[in-house]
Amino acid sequence: MTLFQSILLGIIQGLTEFLPISSSGHLVITPYFFGWDIPPQDAFVFDVLVQVATLGAVIVYFWRDLLAIGKALYNGIRSKKPMADPDSRLGYYILLATIPAGLIGFLIKDLVEQAFNSPTTTGILLLVTAGLLVAAERVGARSRELDQVDWKDALVVGLFQALAIFPGISRSGATITGGMTRNLEREPAARFSFLISIPIMIAAGVLAVIDLAKMPSSTESMYVLAAGMLAAAITGYFAIRWLLQYLTRRPLYGFAIYCAVVGSLALVVSLIRT
């Protein structure tokens, strides 16, 4: 992987991890569009490290929320009233929303890995993401805030998050859709989406780093990968801030159109090349 490829893919990862347009899908189809022959081992290492970088971005952005949730969880356990505080309840709902994706990802791990090698499948699933975003705008009253989330909402959003284990299904897009179908406003749905991404990204990152530690590396390649990580972290932070502001005023239709166009393009290019 070259320095240019690392930085460009890092920027793409940072933007698409939080915008509802599928980071995994873009990391599959971008090298495919440009004809980059990146060795699978290099691609795996890069994907792991930029995921860690974007995890850092979301933690930095939401550090005050996470601190408040952590304190509330501790105080709730200590007082034997774990659900008394709204922040404590939110902490448990975040954990509940993580369970479906973890279980389903474990059960169909091999099928998911095959999908990552298929630009055609990725294109089709980008079209599915477009459909989810349209559905989000069509379904739900958009009348509830984040402090009104309950366990049913967490479970539904968690099931939507499980869809995003496949490349092309946007994790943020699916979970925002799940929240909006439960009548959450767009911005609270996005905020909950980002918060529930933290446990699943930590778990996935730990497992991937364990695999990464078993692979050989060089000092030169680490400089290239570090550039991609930095690009992903910076763009990821600003993507979160921009999207939360955007969703207070505008619908998701623009992202749906983008996913439909990119997904269709991926299918056309795949058809031509085969």
Image: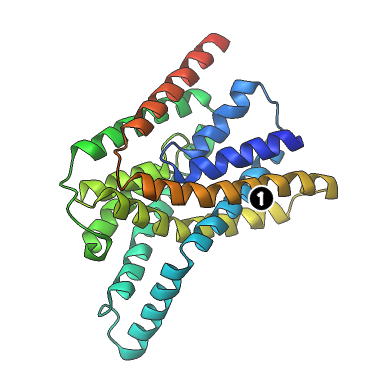
Give the residue displayed 38% in from the left and 65% down from the top.
Answer: 95
Hey, which residue is sitting farthest bottom in the picture? Answer: 79
Assign the C terminus to one quadrant of the image.
top right
Number of numbered discs on residues: 1
Report crowding for label 1: few under 14, some 14 to 19, many 20 or more residues within 10 A (C-alpha).
many
- Amino acid type at circle 1 is Leu
Quadrant position of residue 12: top right
Give the residue displayed 36% in from the left and 56% down from the top.
Answer: 191
* In the rendered image, the vertical position of residue 145 relative to residue 50, given as above or below: below
Quadrant position of residue 71: bottom left
Asked which colour scheme the image uses, the reply is rainbow
Disc 1: which residue: 230
Q: Is residue 151 visible?
A: yes
Quadrant position of residue 116: top right
Tell me residue 59's x, y (percent).
51, 62
Hey, which residue is sitting farthest top in the picture? Answer: 272
Hey, which residue is sitting farthest right in the picture? Answer: 219
Q: Is residue 274 visible?
A: no
What secondary structure is marked by label 1?
helix
> Which one is nearer the viewer's eye here, 28 or 85?
85
> Which one is nearer the viewer's eye here, 98 or 252?
252
* In the rendered image, the vertical position of residue 76 relative to residue 250, given as above or below: below
Tell me residue 132's x, y (percent).
30, 36
Tell me residue 4's x, y (percent).
72, 34
Tell me residue 148's x, y (percent).
21, 64
Give the residue displayed 62% in from the left and 37% down from the top.
Answer: 9
265 to the left or right of 89: right
37 to the left or right of 99: right
> Which one is nearer the viewer's eye here, 4 or 115?
4
Assign the N terminus to one quadrant of the image.
top right
> Which one is nearer the viewer's eye here, 154 or 17?
17
* In the rendered image, the vertical position of residue 10 relative to residue 90, given as above or below: above
